[in-house]
Image (cartoon, rainbow, N blue to C red):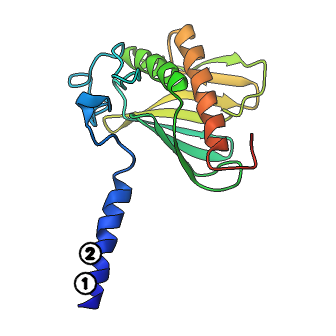
């Protein structure tokens, strides 16, 4: 009987923790819909919620392998990184301006067919976005970026302006994840 008393509160706590920090008021009050990547049920990418955040359309998750960490970005502006600058896992929310830049450019990229062969360009300054970024959509992966060496970025995104805007936003997310829950970094 005492084991049962311990298990029930533990299960309730784990359930609360697993639910994340979503808005309990639901989608009509500003939280993006849980479906995330379904263009048929999601609002158009240009329509922000009541808080000004753009909705994810055509993708569910982005996985960024960069800066010695795997950072997973979900469709409601949260990220989980396996290693911040203090060497620990961290979870956080993406700043609204970065989120909107990221979402707007990623939504645009998802509307276009990917390039059959990646197009590469030289990056003039070193970036902590030094690995890969892949979007997950309906169980499939789509390579967005692959950094080769420290100066070449390859992409499957057709539009160059969209590519540059998305790469800049991903770099900002990598930097934010590095600082999350780490008092050693400014």
Q: Quadrant of the N terminus?
A: bottom left
Percent x, y of residue 151? 76, 25
Rendered position, 95 above or below 106: below
Q: Which secondary structure lies at badge 2?
A: helix
Residue drawn at point x = 41 percent, y = 23 percent: 53
Q: Quadrant of residue 23?
A: top left
In the rendered structure, find residue 42 and report the number of the disc placed on it: none
Residue drawn at point x = 38 percent, y = 49 percent: 20
Pointer 1 local density, CA inside 10 Å: few below 14, some 14–19, many at least 20: few
Q: Is residue 54 left or right of residue 149?
A: left
Q: Which secondary structure lies at badge 1?
A: helix
Residue drawn at point x = 27 percent, y = 82 percent: 5
Rendered position, 103 above or below 7: above
Task: Residue lying at the far bottom in this picture: please name it.
Answer: 1
Q: Is residue 106 left or right of residue 37?
A: right
Along the line of sight, the residue nearer the viewer: 64 or 183: 183
Along the line of sight, the residue nearer the viewer: 72 or 53: 53
Percent x, y of residue 73? 48, 38
Percent x, y of residue 142? 44, 30
Q: Is residue 82 left or right of residue 42?
A: right
The residue labelled by disc 1 is 4
Asked if one can make out residue 131 in the rendered structure from this viewpoint, the answer is no
Asked if one can make out residue 185 in the rendered structure from this viewpoint, the answer is yes
Pointer 2 local density, CA inside 10 Å: few below 14, some 14–19, many at least 20: few
Percent x, y of residue 168? 62, 21
Q: Quadrant of the C terminus?
A: top right
The residue labelled by disc 2 is 8
Residue drawn at point x = 27 percent, y = 30 percent: 29
Q: CA distance from mark 2 to mark 1?
A: 6 Å
Q: Is residue 34 left or right of residue 70?
A: left
Labels 2 & 1 near each other (Cβ < 8 A): yes
């Amino acid at each position: 009987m005492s084991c049962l008393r311990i298990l029930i509160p533990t299960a309730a706590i784990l359930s609360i923790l697993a639910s994340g920090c979503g808005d309990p008021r639901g989608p009509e009050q500003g939280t993006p819909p849980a479906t995330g990547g379904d263009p048929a049920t999601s609002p158009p990418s240009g329509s922000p919620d009541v808080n000004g955040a753009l909705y994810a359309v055509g993708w569910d998750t982005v996985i960024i392998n960069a800066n010695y960490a795997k950072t997973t970005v979900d469709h409601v502006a949260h990220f989980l990184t396996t290693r911040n600058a203090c060497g620990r896992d961290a979870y956080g929310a993406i700043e609204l301006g970065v989120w909107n830049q990221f979402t707007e450019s990623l939504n645009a990229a998802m509307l276009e067919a990917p390039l059959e062969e990646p197009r590469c360009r030289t990056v003039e300054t070193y970036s902590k976005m030094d690995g890969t970024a892949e979007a997950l959509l309906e169980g499939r992966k789509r390579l967005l970026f692959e950094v080769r060496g420290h100066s070449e970025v390859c992409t499957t995104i057709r539009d160059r302006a969209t590519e540059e805007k998305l790469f800049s936003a991903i770099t900002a997310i990598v930097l934010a994840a590095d600082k999350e829950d780490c008092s050693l970094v400014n």
